[in-house]
Image: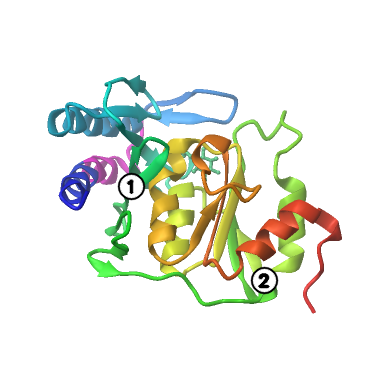
Amino acid sequence: MSDVLPIAEAIARRAGAIVREGFGHVRQVRQKGVIDLVTEFDQRSEEVIVSALQKEFPEHAILAEESGHHARTGEYQWVVDPIDGTTNFAHGIPLFAISLGLLRGKVPVAGVVYDPLHEELFSAVLGRGATLNGRPIHVSSQTHLGQALLATGFAYDIRTNPRNNLAQFAQFQLRTQGVRRLGSAALDCAWTALGRVDGYWEFGIKPWDIAAGGLLVREAGGRTTSTEGDEEFLSTGTIVVSNGLLHEQILRVLREGDAAPLPQ
Ligand code: IPD
């Protein structure tokens, strides 16, 4: 897998250059759903990534946010988000990333999250640790939920889905140092891997948002599960990442809601 990583990093950088140039120059914003946007740069970034992956790894399948499945028969599949944080990007908010995750079966085995404006390239290979711009990174050492800074996000069906995370957002806001809504799940995970935040959870999340980020957290010494605690998180549409030390406390708040203890 280590030989795959430099190729994935180079592809993420190439797509990142396109997205960086497009930042502040968006002309076409289309609504995929009521509040779900796509820009011409999502499409251009994805075309570059998909054609490069097809050239480099002709036997690998690809699942990409905008164009869907590009099937192959092999056991490996790339899961691609050409701009994770499209709403931020379309509004000129400088927080978004390119995310490339490689799965073997259902297990993430390599991942790259690239923030092109801040030139932060997060990478991980299963069993080999996680890095930021080539330097090893580690999750935080926070053990008290009451002192922890968490991140979360809200799915695009927030207006219609009763499990829209608003109740959980309020519960964590009362039980932590604070909760941030960055607008990019890939960066929520990468920042957990780096220790900028201590954890992140979300419901209704797509595999391309979290495949690379979920591995980054594990390889940085943290833990990644579904909101029910399953290690095989990708197919559940939910995620909890943390420094590991806070994981059970986060799962408890998700399980017990208002009945979970308030910090002393
Ligand atoms: C979205 C972002 C956001 C999260 C949404 C995702 P997109 O991805 O990651 O933070 O809350 O659930 O769909 O649409 O910008 O690729």
Viewer-proximal residue, 145 or 223?
223
Mark 1 Cα within 10 Å, few/some/many (few <14, many 20+)?
many
Relative to 211, is 5 on the left or the right?
A: left
* Element assignment for label 2: helix
Q: Is mark 2 within 8 Å of ligand 1?
A: no
Label 1 residue SS: strand
Quarter in which the C terminus is drawn: bottom right
Residue 32, image x and y in percent?
Answer: 50, 23
Report the amino acid beneath label 2.
Leu
Foreground mark, 2 or 1, reads 1
Residue 35 showing in the rendered view: yes
Mark 2, residues whose alpha carbon is within 10 Å: few (<14), some, or many (≥20)? many
Taking the spot 51% from the left edge, 54% from the top edge, the residue there is 224
Instruction: Tell me where residue 148 appears, x and y as whole percent.
Output: 62, 71
| Residue at 84 percent of width and 57 percent of height | 258
In the image, is 141 to the left or to the right of 43?
right
Q: Tell me the distance, in whole angstroms, between the alpha carbons under discs 2 and 1.
A: 29 Å
x, y percent for residue 69? 36, 21
What residue sits right under mark 1 in the picture?
109
Q: Earlier in the sequence, mark 2 or mark 1?
A: 1
Which span is picked out in magenta?
15-27
Magenta: main secondary structure: helix
Decide if residue 201 is on the left or right side of residue 172: left
- Residue holding disc 2: 145
Residue drawn at point x = 48 percent, y = 63 percent: 192
Q: Three-letter amino acid code at disc 1?
A: Val
Residues under numbered marks 2 and 1 in contact, where contact means CB atoms less than 8 Å apart: no
Residue at 22% over, 48% down: 1
- Assess whether residue 21 is covered by the magenta stretch: yes
Which residue is farthest right?
259
